[in-house]
Image: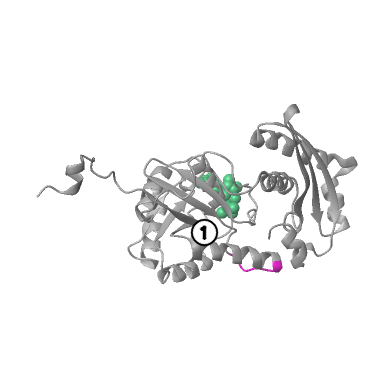
Amino acid sequence: MIDEQHQRGKPADPPEYRAGFVALVGRPNVGKSTLLNQIMGRKLAIVTPKPQTTRHRILGVETRPAAQFLFVDTPGLHQPHNLMGERMVKTARQSLADADVALWVVDAAAGLFDDDRALAGEFASARQPLVIALNKLDRVPRARLLELSQQLGELLPGRHVVPVSALTGDNVGELLTTVESHLPVSPALFPADVQTDLPERFFAAEIVREQLLLATHEEVPYQSAVRIESFEERPGKNLVVIAATILVARTSQRAIVLGEKGARIKHIGQQARHELERFLDVRVYLELHVKVDEKWFTKAHALGELGL
Ligand SMILES: Nc1nc2c(ncn2[C@@H]2O[C@H](COP(=O)(O)OP(=O)(O)O)[C@@H](O)[C@H]2O)c(=O)[nH]1
Ligand SMILES: [Mg+2]
């Protein structure tokens, strides 16, 4: 008997398309955000040498011919010290629970910590497939990579461990192929030209915060935040006018952010404006203010305003 498909003269089905959420999880500072940016070919998540740079869930949609990856960058899993920290860890855990695939990023240069072993224990009983990215291969001799792969293999037998450099992109293609094989069969979930679900205002706040983190030290990066007060497009003029407030917890921190004769805030503003113009691809006028709010990072209301 001739089957129905042949009768209608239809070509054979193409290989099945895959799509799903991939949560990037791991300790702070292992390179999760750098990996997201490397895959996206664009800076969606801010990156600094300081731990806990990422505070929100950041979606990056990467559409390929055979699969659509919905990467979710998350705050690092750590022991929280205040309400903001608790919310960050909760965000990361929720993203992991919602994901189709868990992508655990491990810092090969730093090695395995107790927190990593605890996470491995959780993954051992997790419902979803797990892929392990052994990151920063550019900084580690081969023998050390093999040793760490072996240790991870003992903690989580049968899982794929893929050494990568999120910074240089080395072996990231191989990692994507491995992740793709674990994605569920599904049509694409977002239009092919969509890269994220976050608004431009969010990125504006993050870009200012990145420059703030790069320009300050000690407790200031952890006790500061950026709130966008207004974001106005002037299309005829190819211009966006942005007003932002930098929140700090103490008067002394305000003085640090301002700098001598306002030199530091001027520098932060110039750098941020430059980055914003690149990101938004328009001219940007940026107005920055610094406000002291002693306990903003422990107040539910203040955190809510910041999307935390
Ligand atoms: N040498 C090297 N540094 C990396 C690599 N990936 C990330 N980093 C650096 O590690 C630091 C933390 O990166 P980030 O992406 O913010 O880590 P996250 O906290 O896990 O999101 C930054 O200084 C990055 O430049 C890598 O593959 N090689
Ligand atoms: Mg990050």
Q: Is residue 208 visible?
A: yes
Q: Is residue 70 left or right of residue 299?
A: left
Other residues around mark 1 within 10 Å, as few (<14) / some (14–19) / many (≥20): many
Q: Look at 41% across and 68% down and name the residue there.
A: 127
Q: Which of the 4 quarters of the picture holds residue 79?
A: bottom right
Q: Position of residue 268 (x, y in %)?
A: 77, 41
Q: Position of residue 129 (x, y in %)?
A: 39, 62
Q: Which of the 4 quarters of the picture holds residue 42?
A: top right
Q: Position of residue 286 (x, y in %)?
A: 79, 38
Q: Look at 45% across and 67% down and name the residue there.
A: 120
Q: Nearer the viewer, residue 151 or 92?
A: 92
How many numbered callouts? 1
Residue type at tag 1: Val
In magenta, the rendered stretch is: 78-83
9 to 127, vertically: above or below: above
Q: Is residue 136 left or right of residue 16?
A: right
167 to 219, vertically: above or below: above
Query: What residue would you read off at disc 1?
Result: 25
Q: Look at 74% across and 45% down and name the residue there.
A: 215
Q: Position of residue 154 (x, y in %)?
A: 36, 66
Q: Residue pushed farthest top?
A: 237
